Image (cartoon, rainbow, N blue to C red):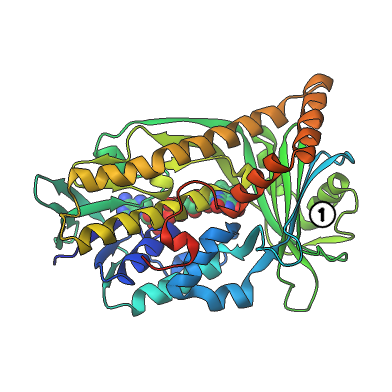
Amino acid sequence: MHADVIIIGGGLIGSTLALALARHEVSSIVVDAQDLDATTLPAFDRRASAIASASARMLRALGLGELFDSEGCAIREIRVTDGVAPQFLHFDAGVDGDPLGIMLENRLLRIALLRAVRAHPLVTLVAPAKVAALQRDATTATLTLADGRVFTAPLAIAADGRRSQTREAAGIRLTGWSYPNAALVTMVAHSVPHGGVACELFYPSGPLALLPMTDTADGRPRSAIVWTVKADAAAGARKLGPKALAAELASRIDGTLGDVEIIAPQVVWPLGYHHAASYSAERLLLIGDAAHGIHPIAGQGLNMGFRDVAALAEVLVEAARTGQDLGAPAVLARYSAWRRLDNAMVGAVTDGLHRLFGLPGRLPAAVRRFGLAGVERLPPLKARFMAEARGETGQLPALLKGELV
Ligand SMILES: Cc1cc2nc3c(=O)[nH]c(=O)nc-3n(C[C@H](O)[C@H](O)[C@H](O)COP(=O)(O)OP(=O)(O)OC[C@H]3O[C@@H](n4cnc5c(N)ncnc54)[C@H](O)[C@@H]3O)c2cc1C
């Protein structure tokens, strides 16, 4: 079977790319190692993501607007504090402004994407399936599955996540390190409404994020928690019962949400940074976590992948319209040039923030407060941070403006 592109990995990024291309008449074969229905079960991924406004605009343009209307919770304000210190940096979308982001359960996004991809005649989904080999030569990328099926296309795209075997097999090196921290993720119901406010409280062990969600089924305010803990404390945190975990949380958020009740089992994620030395090889491109992964301190990892999708879709759609070979070096180079620097900068900033806020002692604390106060008093700098949160910096592809290419 032949298609315009082969996408290896049908996670949030791979399936969004397939949908974006299909909406522009570019066909794809998406191969995933897992049973994708199993990835929509609550136990598979209990995370919720802060989806930047620009990413949400793209997903709406691709037909997922109903999901955002019914299940998305707009982030109207972001408050950043050093612990529960009163000095804080405050971003406010204003009454009429675009929200700073939309909180959405990953599971619900997976369900909507899978449904849309399955319904589109230009996407062939092959999952679960084991890749036996990907051969690339001057004219074709040929993917062979363990069951003997063979697929061809002028271009293969690796969207197979942070441990990308496609990247490894292509010999693309990775710069990266593990953080001595882990993220504990859970969900709470609480007595005080969040009012669409996201709070990021910085502690020496790492940031604690309270992220506003839609209400529970019985009408109680609900928030997602992403709590960075020291890696050696993660095992203990994983074992805490709901009451003990609620008590630990309450002691760090100073009544911000009122009484809190843990309503989802906590999951602990190891944290690391990685960036591929190159985003391309002969007839191969990397996107999403296969290309980069960052600390979730600013909730940008998935959004970087969505920006990859929007840029790559634009590059490939324009190449297809002008009759170019989709795997030609010039096409690959255009995508790499568009995305590498932006991803490197977001990675460097999140790594720097993580390190700055992780430093114990009075002097670093004073520097942080001085820095936060400085940003607060400088409207242009503040506007820049808000544009970053909304995903509106740099050269925006059409999809991130909510337009088809
Ligand atoms: C605690 C935490 C909180 C986060 N919060 C946010 C947030 O608020 N906002 C944000 O923007 N980002 C956030 N992120 C980052 C975000 O979750 C990731 O960037 C995103 O899930 C990456 O998506 P992906 O599709 O590239 O990779 P993945 O989700 O890893 O998907 C890869 C897919 O490839 C498949 N696959 C793997 N190997 C193979 C193979 N050999 N053959 C075929 N298929 C294969 C897998 O089955 C999977 O379906 C967070 C991350 C963490 C850890």
Give above or below for 256 relative to 208.
Answer: below
Residue where numbered disc 1 is placed: 246
Q: Residue at 50% x, 71% y: name it.
A: 60
Q: Residue at x 46, y 75 (%)?
A: 63
Q: Amino acid at mark 1?
A: Ala
Q: Is residue 102 visible?
A: yes
Between 192 and 180, the one nearer to me in the picture: 192
Q: Is residue 178 left or right of residue 21?
A: right
Which quarter of the picture shows residue 121?
Answer: bottom left
Q: From the top left corner, tell me how far across and down residue 389 is, in percent.
A: 62, 50
Asked whether, in this view, residue 135 is left or right of residue 208, the answer is left
| Badge 1 element | helix
Q: Is residue 226 above or below residue 203?
A: below
The quadrant of the picture occupied by the N terminus is bottom left
Number of residue marks: 1
Where's residue 401, x and y in %?
Answer: 49, 62
Q: In the drawing, does residue 132 fall left or right of residue 59?
A: left
Kindly identify the residue that appears in the image at 61 percent across and 76 percent down: 69
Residue 44 seen in render? no
Residue 175: horizontal and vertical position, in percent? Answer: 42, 29
| Snapshot quadrant of residue 115 | bottom left
Image quadrant occupied by the C terminus: bottom left
> Relative to the observer, which residue lies in front, 320 or 301?
320
